[in-house]
Image (cartoon, rainbow, N blue to C red):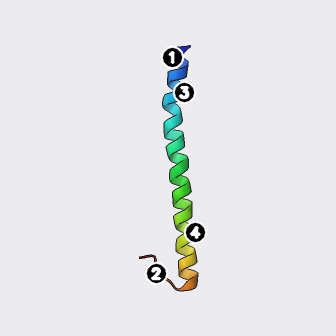
């Protein structure tokens, strides 16, 4: 039982990290598109 719990615990962290990374990339792409439409620079 403890082995299963530890395995799930270890596998959850990469999934959470991937989800957060995908969210950040999506927000960055959205901001880049909005800046291009407004003629602004991202820097």
First reached walking from the N terminus: tag 3 or tag 4: 3
Q: Disc 4 marks which residue?
A: 30
Q: In 3D space, how far apart are the residues under numbered discs 3 and 1 (Cα atoms)?
A: 9 Å
Q: Secondary structure at mark 3?
A: helix
Distance in Å between CA atoms under marks 2 and 4 = 13 Å
| Residue to which mark 1 is pinned | 3
Question: With respect to residue 1, does 36 lie above or below?
Answer: below
> x, y percentage for residue 35?
53, 78
Distance from Cα at disc 2 to Cα at disc 1: 51 Å
**Quadrant where the C terminus lies?**
bottom left
Q: Earlier in the sequence, mark 2 or mark 4?
A: 4
Residue 34 position within the rendered picture, expressed as x and y whole percent measured from the top left: 58, 76
Quarter in which the N terminus is drawn = top right
**Image marks 4 and 1: residues in contact by CB distance under 8 Å:** no
Expressed as whole percent of the image width and height from the top left, the position of residue 42 reads 45, 76
Give the alpha-carbon distance from disc 3 to disc 4, as whole Å.
33 Å
Element type at mark 1: helix
Which quadrant would residue 30 be assigned to in this image?
bottom right
Residue at numbered disc 3: 8
Binning the other alpha carbons within 10 Å of mark 1 as few (below 14), some (14 to 19) or many (20 upward) gives few
Residue at screen point 52% across, 60% down: 25
Q: Earlier in the sequence, mark 3 or mark 2?
A: 3
Which badge, 3 or 1, comes first in the chain's sequence? 1
Q: Which residue is mark 2?
A: 41
């Amino acid at each position: 039982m403890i082995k299963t719990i530890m395995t799930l615990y270890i596998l959850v962290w990469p999934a959470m990290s991937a989800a957060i990374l995908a969210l950040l990339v999506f927000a960055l792409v959205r901001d880049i598109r909005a800046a291009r439409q407004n003629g602004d620079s991202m820097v």
